[in-house]
Amino acid sequence: MTDIAINAAFDSGNIDVISIDGASATLAIPADHMSEFRQWFHFRVTGAAGRELVLRITDLNTSAYPAGWPGYNACVSEDRDYWGRAETTFDKGEDGGTLTIRYTPASDVAWFAYFAPYSMERHHDLVAEAASAEGVEYRCLGLTLDGQPLDCLAMGEGQTQVWLYARQHPGESMAEWWMEGALEVLTDPADPVARVLRQKCRLNVVPNCNPDGSRRGHLRTNAVGTNLNREWHEPSAEKSPEVLAIRNAMDETGVDFAMDVHGDEAIAANFLAGFEGIPSWSEELQAKYNSFQLILARRTPEFQTAKGYPVARAGKANLSMSTNQVAERFGACSMTLEMPFKDNDDLPDPEQGWSPERCKLLARECLAALVEWLEAEGR
């Protein structure tokens, strides 16, 4: 029996091949460069048409988020357009924690990933298309350590300063799928949500805060192993130029409303995390955040408020995280949107789990919720 071939030498690829025997393979996930974070995988398998693949990814009990593996099904695609889910099991007691993926491809090439990838080529297409839309201004906020541009798109004539930014953690590729959905809405001249937002707001959109980590196949860090979402209190040109550039741009505009878009490995739901615990917390600011949560929960069954992160105690917020720093620095209604790597268990889809298509639909609901929130605020 001919052995399959496995390769990850491409944009966002990440896997180590331990052994291959026919259509079975033992694999491991390498850590981010200069970091111990490891969870993201993305690789292709060739030579397996009509044969059941058995792919074992080992030593996962010491991965970044081992709670992310139980109940998780790997993403798979044969055309790199539609991403479904493969039959996947996790055994904590096997080889330090083993994820076993079983899949029988119809063609000779199949791609597997932790979540549907969002390539840097697609990112450039997204930026080019949005930048060519009427009324959109493109700005390069700076360069990353690998020399990639940090792209920002601005639009709207209103006074309310809105910042939408995503993918500080590059392996959370669902965040840029959300951004694609958001930009499709915002650049559509016929869309009523976009028309209202562009009348009332100045929107600043950073679709990918971490291009280097995205291209390198990292889970959580940039080119030198820095977790960008722990740098907002004191970013530096040496370790976190991405955060430094974005925060400097925010200082120029001010911020009234901010959403930082992420993904969560373990919690099978969409939820928000706020800024409770910042030194300048007030009931008034908290009420603004609570109002947005309730509007979004009413608008879509894809969002809920029962599951999420523990709330920080008074004065104990971590100001190195963007949501806390932006709320404290600008008095902004700031929040982190978390989407699942698994599925929304309240509205499951066995074929795709949480998917690019659902990310994009949720983006529209978030923007429509923002319209309602602005009206409630009298803006």
Image (spheres, grey):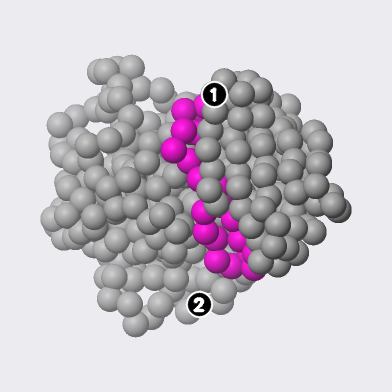
Separation of residues labelled 1 and 2 (CA atoms): 50 Å
- Whether residue 157 can be seen here: no
Q: Name the residue rendered at 30%, 25% in the picture.
A: 310
Quick one: 184 or 98, which is closer to the camera? 98
The amino acid beneath tag 2 is Ala
Using the image as rendered, state which of residue 69 and residue 133 is in the foreground: 69
Q: Is residue 116 visible?
A: yes
Residue 186 sits in quarter: bottom left
Q: Residue at x 86, y 53 (%)?
A: 2
Quarter of the figure with the C terminus: bottom left
What residue sits right under mark 1 in the picture?
Answer: 92
Start and end of the magenta stretch? Answer: 63-85
Instruction: Report whether 2 appears left or right of 159.
Output: right
Label located before the other in sequence (1 or 2): 1
Q: Residue 152's spot in the image, x, y percent? A: 54, 57
Secondary element under disc 1, as helix, strand or loop, is loop
Q: Is residue 83 magenta?
A: yes
Question: Which residue matches tag 2?
Answer: 133
Amino acid on which disc 1 is placed:
Lys
Compared to residue 275, the image places residue 211 above or below, namely below
